[in-house]
Amino acid sequence: MNMVEMGQVFAYLLKYRYVESKSGERKKSRSGEGDVAAILQSSSPDSLASFQEFLDGQGLQLREYRDTDFKGIPPGGRVWLMMRSPTGSVAPYLGIERLHQMMALRDNESRATTSTWFLHVWILYLALVYTRLGRGVAEISKYQDAVFTKTQLVEAVVSHLEQIRKIGVDKGAEETVFAILDAAKGGDVDRRVSAFLDLMRDAALVISIDSDTYQQTLLGAAEFAEGYGRTLQHYLRIDNDSTDGLANVANILTASSADKNTEGLSDVPD
């Protein structure tokens, strides 16, 4: 892999996050995918090591899987994933600014607002693709079974907000977080969930099967398993807001709510 080819591979992975040598999840290969797959297939171990060194500086890592690793990869096929490194610094184009831009519904929304909404929708999403299936974090191979609808996620968020309003600040909810979530009105929940799913789809962590149905991708499952316990930090870091870090953002997830929505997510150490 020469420098020109490295740039070609990186540009493709930066846009799509994974490369398939044979069409798997999609009916057709994307433009340029065959060329990038051919470069990766023909690259020497030294070339791939050099490429990984480059990715290290971006907070990224390259992972390769074959058809013998997981179902869903076509016979003889190979898949390369550009995953976030669980220990490295996250590249700006995958970090908090992008999250903030996509999750914001109104002008001048704070990072605390967008991060709070992302975290709560994210946890309810995890309930759909892990808890509902009785699936452990390490069970990457079940990514094809992790199918859910936007309608289900919206209903879960609405139910969660109803519970939050019943709890209230008087019963121990952090005031700032409660105020952010309680301010939802009209079509806000639908718009927040749509923004969340757009963000997840753009990051190739889910794919859309139809207008209402989504599936976790191999990348989404592998990245979550790899970074479990650190994963939320890949998407949000609250440095200069009024909230006091993740503890306060997650405060509104009461014991009963957290147990219900994240059961099964604690059986694999980070």
Image: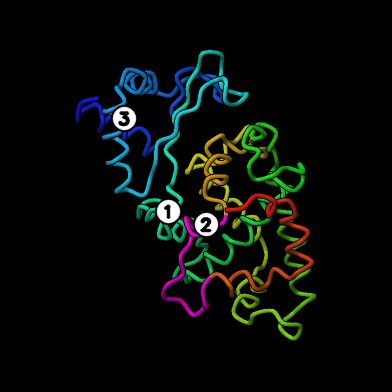
Mark before the other along the chain sequence, 1 or 3 = 3
User: Residue 207: which quarter of the image?
Assistant: top right
Label 3 or label 2, whichever comes before in sequence order:
3
The picture places residue 60, in percent across and down from the top left corner, at 38, 45
Q: Quadrant of residue 34?
A: top left
54 lies above or below 38: below
Image quadrant where residue 215 sits: top right
Graded by Cα atoms within 10 Å as few (under 14), some (14 to 19) or many (20 or more), the crowding at tag 2 reads few
Start and end of the magenta stretch? 229-245
Q: What mark, if any, has residue 48 been given in the picture?
A: 3
Q: Amino acid at mark 1?
A: Thr
Q: Where is residue 45 shown, x and y percent of the image?
A: 31, 26
The residue that label 2 is drawn on is: 230
The quadrant the N terminus occupies is top left
- The mark found on residue 132 in the picture is none
Q: Which residue is mark 1?
A: 87
Spatial CA distance of label 3 from label 2 is 26 Å
Kind of residue at badge 3: Leu
User: What is the tally of numbered marks visible in this picture?
Assistant: 3
User: Taking 127 as reference, is 87 left or right?
Assistant: left
Q: Residue at x 42, y 48 (%)?
A: 85
User: What is the spatial separation of the Cα atoms under label 1 and label 2, in whole angstroms?
Assistant: 8 Å
* SS for callout 1: loop
Out of 111 and 251, give the one closest to the viewer: 251
